[in-house]
Image (cartoon, rainbow, N blue to C red):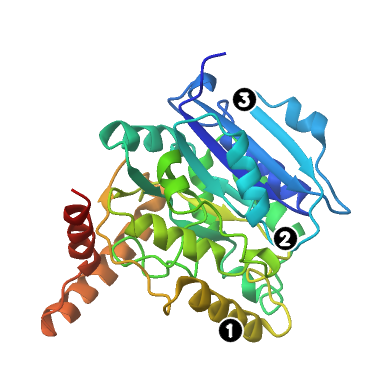
Amino acid sequence: MSKPLLSIIVIAYDMPRQALNTLISLSPAYQQGVEAADYEVILVENRSKRNMDAAAIAALPGNFHYFLRDESGVSPAAAINFGFAQARGQFIGLMIDGARMVTPGVVQNVLMAFALHESAMVAVPGYHLGENEQQFHLTHRYTEEKEQALLDEIDWQRNGYSLFDISCLSGANPNGVFHPFMECNCLFMSAEVFREIGQADERFDLPGGGALNLCIYRKVAMHPRTRFFMLPGEGSFHQLHGGVTTSEVEKREAILRRQNEQLTQLLGQPFRSPSVEPILLGKVPSSALRYLQHSAERGIHRARRFAEHNEELYADERAKERMRQELQ
């Protein structure tokens, strides 16, 4: 077998149904315009009371590699680095939360971005299944059973873009694609860039990794060689599974404060969303147009506000240019 161009690393823990949906959405039977040989999917599962069905994974078409490992900690950081060590691709994708299904054009558009720029950083916007963000699922009486009924109703495996019809924007990017993102739960970069940022920092040892995802996103975005591509017509859709910050849990605000404290400590400065200007890539299906409209409306508001204060919309682009010049 020839070396795959792209390795997608998916991390799972105690989410067998949701993670299998994610893998199905990454299979060449679902992804459009790509062949199985174009990419591999590396699933790393930290052992729990509910592990995945290895036979169901093996039955999927495509290049899936499943690793079940024992993890003494509560963070996915070590599992990410383990998955990266198995990756054979020149480019990698990171899905730290394995409960995120994707739309059918993700892999095709990611490969297109890397064909345009070998140090591309590609972000897939995030959504939550259901009418409301899932950290309020108890308030809105949203359950896994209701979610499964929604998925059955739209027949998502036949029409993946119908996921937009049963979802809402994630709180990490509530203003859409013309505002800086805090994080991305379906992020792609070159393997070389991932090595150069130090891979996943295993000092992020809080449950769920704490703010590890934010740290990786900022470091990749601010890497001097990366060029930022955004896929406005694609999405990653979070499924309810009892996540640390994506479910209505007690003391959620205290958990978020602790995560932010650790992020500030390990970054060496307070976190700020990187203001890098995206290149929009790919088609936008009709089901996603309402989100593009929302993005444009919020983007216009932001542009006017910045103009009033004579501020740059994407100030970090200038900082990256200075870093590039220093490296020459």
Say which amino acid is labelled 3. Answer: Asn
Of labels 2 and 3, earlier in sequence is 3
Q: Which residue is mark 3?
A: 63
Say which amino acid is labelled 2. Answer: His
Of labels 1 and 3, earlier in sequence is 3
| Image quarter (top left, top right, bottom left or bottom right) of the N terminus | top right
Task: State the SS at label 2.
Answer: loop
Q: Residue at x 50, y 24 (%)?
A: 4
- Packing grade of label 1 (10 A; few <14, some 14-19, many >=20) is few
Q: Residue 246 falls in which quadrant of the image?
A: bottom right
Whether residue 103 is visible here, answered yes or no, is no
| Gap between marks 1 and 2 measured at Cα | 22 Å
Of labels 1 and 2, earlier in sequence is 2
Q: Residue 82 falls in which quadrant of the image?
A: top right
- Packing grade of label 2 (10 A; few <14, some 14-19, many >=20) is some
State the image coordinates of residue 143 (x, y, percent, origin top left): 74, 65
| Gap between marks 2 and 3 measured at Cα | 26 Å
Say which amino acid is labelled 1. Answer: Arg
Q: Nearer the viewer, mark 2 or mark 3?
A: 3
98 versus 144 height, above or below = above
Task: State the SS at label 1.
Answer: helix
145 or 124: nearer the viewer: 124
Q: State the mark number for residue 257.
A: 1
| Gap between marks 1 and 3 measured at Cα | 39 Å
State the image coordinates of residue 75 (x, y, percent, origin top left): 69, 61
State the image coordinates of residue 153 (x, y, percent, origin top left): 64, 47
118 versus 242 height, above or below = above
The answer to whether residue 179 is left or right of residue 264 is: left
Q: Residue at x 26, y 34 (%)?
A: 116
Q: Residue at x 50, y 43 (%)?
A: 93
Q: Which residue is mark 2?
A: 241
